Image: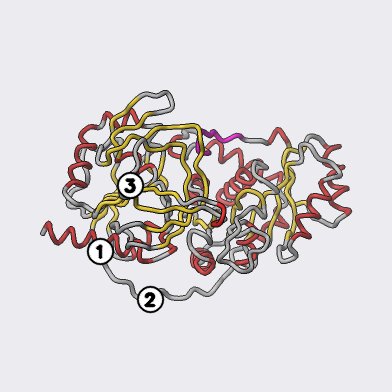
Amino acid sequence: MALIIAGERSGVGKTTITLAILAFLQQKSASVQSFKVGPDYIDPMFHQRITGRPCRNLDPLLTSPEYVQSCFNQHCQGAEYAIIEGVMGLFDGVQNPLYQENSLGDYGSTAHIARLLGLPVVLVLDSSRLSTSIAAIVQGYRSLDPRINIVGVILNRVASDRHLYLLQEALNWIGMPILGTLGRESEITLSDRHLGLIPVDELPHLTQIFDKLAEIASTALDWPQLFPLLAAPVLPVVPSPPLPQFPVRIALAKDRAFNFYYQDNLEQLEALGAELIPWSPLEDATLPKEIHGLYLGGGFPEVFAPALSANKSALACVHKEIALGIPTYAECGGLMYLTEKILDFEEQSWPMVGILPTTTIMGQKLNLGYRRAISGQASCLLDPEQIVWGHEFHRSYLSENSERPLYHLQGLPLSKTSTLTEGWSKKNLHASYLHLHFGQSLTFSSKFLGNCLAFSQKLA
């Protein structure tokens, strides 16, 4: 079966409730596969810390509807339970003009994923300012798209027994089961900052938080109704065709400053024969030996700018290798690391690698959204005029843009956004704010690794 935890809107507590369910099942020594709708990196880190299994992103815009289905089918194998955490409100997505059925404008939404996978939905509601009106809200969600099977609701932030009685009476009137009730005293706050939750590696007391969440879930949720809904389906998996092999070693920046990676990206590189060697720009003085490529993912370099800047040996080493021609893929935080310096929120300046002649400046404006990008020229990842879909999520900007930009960008809907230029490209370098999911095209990783293999042969 498997179950989707959706919200009536953002901020209703669906992440907390999803983590509570995962923590309770983990205490029962159950094997649980979790998924996250959309492009988010941080929520999946919390999932994985609890379950011990990588959480998978389900994003039909960054990949495709077919990829979402195959990813779900493949990774449910061997799990007892499967759960999908939604994104924003149930129907909040985008209008994709390339998708004919997208009349509602909910492409990529939690509802879209429910339709693609044919899965039931539990709707989480913030009940703090509601009583009888909750029936109208739930009825509206249930009737908007009859293809979405809302099997029950979880009520969050219930104030009292009297408050709960009013909510129950209203939901009984429309025949909607209540699968859980959490009071205001049950609220657990996870620390956040300018781009969302603080990642798990920076939180010292997670075990106690997860134990508390499991305790809340044990009494607040209706497990006799939930267990059958959460049971992982046994689905057919189409065998993958043989893939070309690239026996290369890739240095993967992995520490508290750089930890935004889609697990599918890493596994695709490994499936193509690459060996990923983790290293820390914060802690390691040099790059790993005998490497043929660099992968600098996203993260929070602005938060750790003093420590990154102090590791001058690592900065010099990265600069030298890129100047010598090592293929390098730098994404968002990785791009920031390669600039001359980061000017933080307090306007303090921290020298960085300096391979790109520009400064990263932290600002208050949030750049957020999906982008349709057309490569203006070749990089170690893309061919000229190649069309890709990516996602931007950052509060910084560059003092100087490239004279030969990597991308021409468009947002969604396509007809209402002016074309922009973004990113830096050299023969061996692909550096951009745009996050890419390699499930979109095998050509991303195969071209990158092909360039890494050619570089290794030059070294031989």
Decide whether residue 194 is among the magenta residues.
Answer: yes
- Identity of the residue drawn at 64% across and 46% down: 14
Mark 3 or 1, nearer chain start? 3
Q: Position of residue 234 (x, y in %)?
A: 56, 70
Q: Position of residue 29 (x, y in %)?
A: 54, 53
Disc 1 marks a residue whose amino acid type is Gly
Q: Do the CB atoms of the residues marked 3 and 1 lie less than 8 Å apart?
A: no
- Identity of the residue drawn at 43% across and 27% down: 345
Decide whether residue 375 is among the magenta residues.
Answer: no
Q: Do the CB atoms of the residues marked 3 and 2 lie less than 8 Å apart?
A: no
What residue is shown with label 3? 296
For marks 3 and 1, give the CA distance: 18 Å
Residue range of the region highlighted in magenta in the rendering: 189-196
- Point out the image quarter for the C terminus: bottom left
What residue is shown with label 2? 241
In the image, is residue 289 above or below residue 64? above
Disc 3 marks a residue whose amino acid type is Leu
- Identity of the residue drawn at 61% across and 55% down: 93
Mark 3 or 2, nearer chain start? 2
> Image quarter for residue 241?
bottom left
- Point out the image quarter for the N terminus: bottom right
Q: Secondary structure at mark 2?
A: loop
Q: Residues within 10 Å of mark 2 (few under 14, many from 20)?
A: few
Nearer the observer: mark 1 or 2; the answer is 1
Left/right placement of residue 242 relative to residue 231 reads: left
Q: Secondary structure at mark 3?
A: strand
Q: Residues within 10 Å of mark 3 (few under 14, many from 20)?
A: many
What residue is shown with label 1? 450
Left/right placement of residue 165 relative to residue 27 reads: right
For marks 3 and 2, give the CA distance: 29 Å
